[in-house]
Amino acid sequence: MENNNARLLLKPGREKAVLHRHPWVFSGAVAQVEGDPPPGAVVEVVDAGGRWLARGTYSPRSQIRVRLCTWEAGEAVDQAFLRRRLQRARAGRAALEHSAATTAYRLVHAESDGLPGVIVDRYGPCLVLQLLSQGAEAWRADLVALLAAEFSPQSIYARDDAAVRTLEGLPQRAGLLWGTEPPERVAVEEGAGHFLVDIRRGQKTGAYLDQRENRLRVAPFCAGAEVLDAFTGSGWFAVHAARSDAAAVLGLDSSAEALALAAENARLNGVGDRVHGQAGDAFAVLRDLRAAGRTFDVVILDPPKFASRQSQVLAATRGYKDINLLGMQLLRPGGLLATFSCSGLVSADLFQKVVFGASVDAGRDAQIVAHLAQGADHPVLLTFPEGAYLKGLLCRVW
């Protein structure tokens, strides 16, 4: 973590974001780099006049040239810094850590927890570490040692297979970092539900932990209902719905492997007779269901990210409108639509406008019952609004 006295000079007038404590310095704001820092090195960020502003880690291949770690001139970015940040993140999840009802949650949420590019998720006795930037990669050995000492997990497993690593010039890989090899299925608790997680091959680091609070919030609306859960994945929304006495749940997913795990989770919770999976493209299956005259009391739409780049936003809004139009057309009058977008480039305001457009095209009145977002273990730093990527609407559709 040596900074080698490297400095990054900003162009005139480009210091405002840094002064406002936004954690990213983009390449277009950089006038000059002094000291030839290697990838992941700590660098000093100064304005055009040489005034010190902040300190962060350097990534020469990324559009995000520096990820800022501290605005305190006397705070070194070293192992003690990492320990303080981990301890602060842990303190923010104290209620979850001491809850027997929740054994799967995000422990470190990257920039929002002051550790840019670092994701740490807990799945029962196992920690999953995902490093998404050159700076985070440089911290790997220290992070593993600190996590082992602070949390005494059974395993620390790497899921460095996110596509964003390629933008940083980093390889994709996964594997055991510390402790014993985790089981094929890690058992966790969420609310009153029991779930099995595949931390080697499951989505993200194993499961969609950011939806925990939304799953628990939507489930009570499913009592006695026929539920359609599009993009069901490993079935967590579906299982919670069935545990809340849904009459029947149909889960759709393109992955046969995910549906097999969803069926395991349903059986584990004693609701295998009421949760059924169907493989196929969700857009096509929803159209088939509409053509067949099928209707439901609750429709849950939790698709994968539709936009990873700004150039994809327009196509993403079309996809969101299409899927929400189909969802509303499949709802009985007075039914509930729980609809989500995890595309950070699609704002909550834009997403609401898209759902509004779908309601007009469907000829249905839709009332917003609640605005939904990522769970409290995925906090949003006020100076980093980009951290608010998950948004959702709970709508009553007439």
Image (spheres, rainbow, N blue to C red):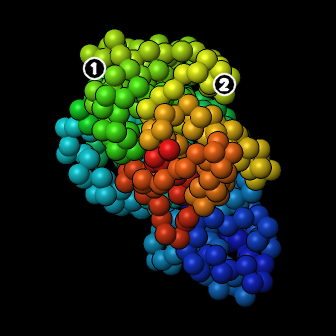
Of the image marks 2 and 1, the number of the one nearer the N terminus: 1
For image coordinates 30% across by 38% down, the residue present is: 220
Residue matched to label 1? 269
Which quarter of the picture shows residue 282?
A: top right
Does residue 5 appear left or right of residue 87 in this picture?
A: right
Position of 330 with respect to 36 (left or right) is left
Q: Nearer the viewer, residue 102 or 11?
A: 102
Vertical arrangement, residue 337 with respect to residue 20, above or below: above
In the rendered image, residue 128, in percent from the top left (x then y), is placed at 43, 35
User: What number is the disc on residue 287?
Assistant: 2
Classed neighbour count for the residue bearing mark 2: other residues with Cα under 10 Å, few (<14), some (14–19), many (≥20):
some
Residue 374, percent from left and from top: 45, 50
Callout 1: SS: loop
Residue 255 locus on image (x, y percent): 58, 18
Visible in this render: residue 276? yes
Q: Are marks 2 and 1 in contact (CB under 8 Å)?
A: no
- Residue 68: x %, y % from top left: 57, 66
Residue at position x 51%, y 26% in the image: 295
162 shown above or below 52: above
Q: Secondary structure at mark 2?
A: helix
Type of amino acid at the residue the image marks with label 1: Asn
73 or 16, nearer to the observer: 16
Q: CA distance from mark 2 to mark 1?
A: 30 Å
Looking at the image, is mark 2 or mark 1 nearer the viewer? 2
Amino acid type shown at disc 2: Arg
Say which mark, if any, is on residue 190.
none
Which residue: 74% across, 50% down? Answer: 313
Res 196 → quadrant = top left
